[in-house]
Image: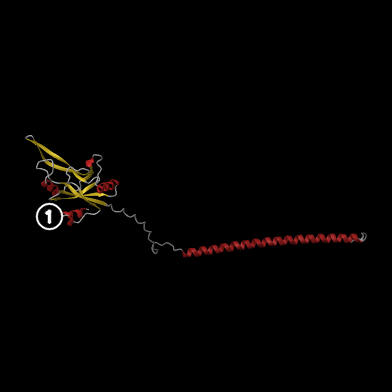
Amino acid sequence: MPSCLPAPYYVGVDTIVYNTCAIVVSTTLSTRITTISITALFFLLVIAVIARASTHNKMEQQRNAKRVKYNPKTTKLLPLPLPPPPPPPPAAISYFYAIGTADPGTGNKDGYFFTMPELADVVKSGYMLGTQVWLEHGDASREIIGDVVYTWLDKKSGLMVVLRFDFQTLRSKVLLEWIKSGLFSGISLGYNADVKYIEGLIIVHKKTIVELSIVRDPYHKSCKIGFIGNTIPQVADSPPDTRIQAEEDPWQTVFSCL
């Protein structure tokens, strides 16, 4: 230190130098510490990533170990699930039945009206089964409202018929109420008549029934519906002494065809 400078000057310079060196050293240390911290954080991050990847690989290996590899020789395939069952069939169509006299059989031979022997031939041939049932002979519309399911001949009443109606249709439901109220309770046969003219006389030699109608005012007043219901009465309900016995029980056919 030069001796020509005053003492306070030297002291001040030393202090300044010392403080400056201290700041430089402090800054250097801080920079190194920051660098070391960043480096340490980087290594910690790398270690965490490696550890996470290792854990993921182990979990994947465990899942793969649990999976069953497909081998067509050793692996048994599980059956496919069965399809859902089909919807249930619709409910059986319900019917209601009407029983009554279709023709009294009071006509004369070769006339326009049926005789008992002619009605007996109708019953024996069975061609009337399935005959369509109309309303008032189709005057308004020839809509089929029912069908004939059985016929038999009664010695006193004439041709008896069992009629079947589909209870699901609106027209049949209305007709049921009409019959119950007595508005439409008559029965009338619709048939074609083949005639010949012999010596000025009209001879009807053949009659063919084509339909049966429910009417308000039947030509034969005795042709009425005597029973209506959801089931057919038992054969015992018809007096046996008024039935023309056939080769088989006439009611047996009723229950076999329904």
Count the labels in the image: 1
* 42 lies above or below 100: below
Viewer-proximal residue among 179 and 188: 179
Q: Is residue 198 above or below residue 22?
A: above
| Res. 246 visible in picture | no
What amino acid is found at the position of numbered circle 1 in the picture? Asp
From the viewer's perspective, is 235 left or right of 174? left
Counting from the top left corner in percent of width and height, residue 95 is at: 26, 51
Give the residue drawn at x 66%, y 61%: 41
Position of residue 55 measured from the top left corner of the image (x, y, whole percent): 55, 64
2 with respect to 189 (left or right): right
**Mark 1 lies on residue:** 241
166 left or right of 239? right
Q: Residue at x 58, y 64 (%)?
A: 51
Depth order, front residue of 191/60: 191
Residue 4 figure quarter: bottom right
Q: Secondary structure at mark 1?
A: helix
Position of the N terminus by quadrant:
bottom right
Q: Position of residue 244 (x, y in %)?
A: 12, 52
**Crowdedness near tag 1: few (<14), some (14–19) or many (≥20) residues, C-alpha within 10 Å:** few
Residue 229 location, x and y as percent? 24, 52
Residue 215: image quadrant is: top left
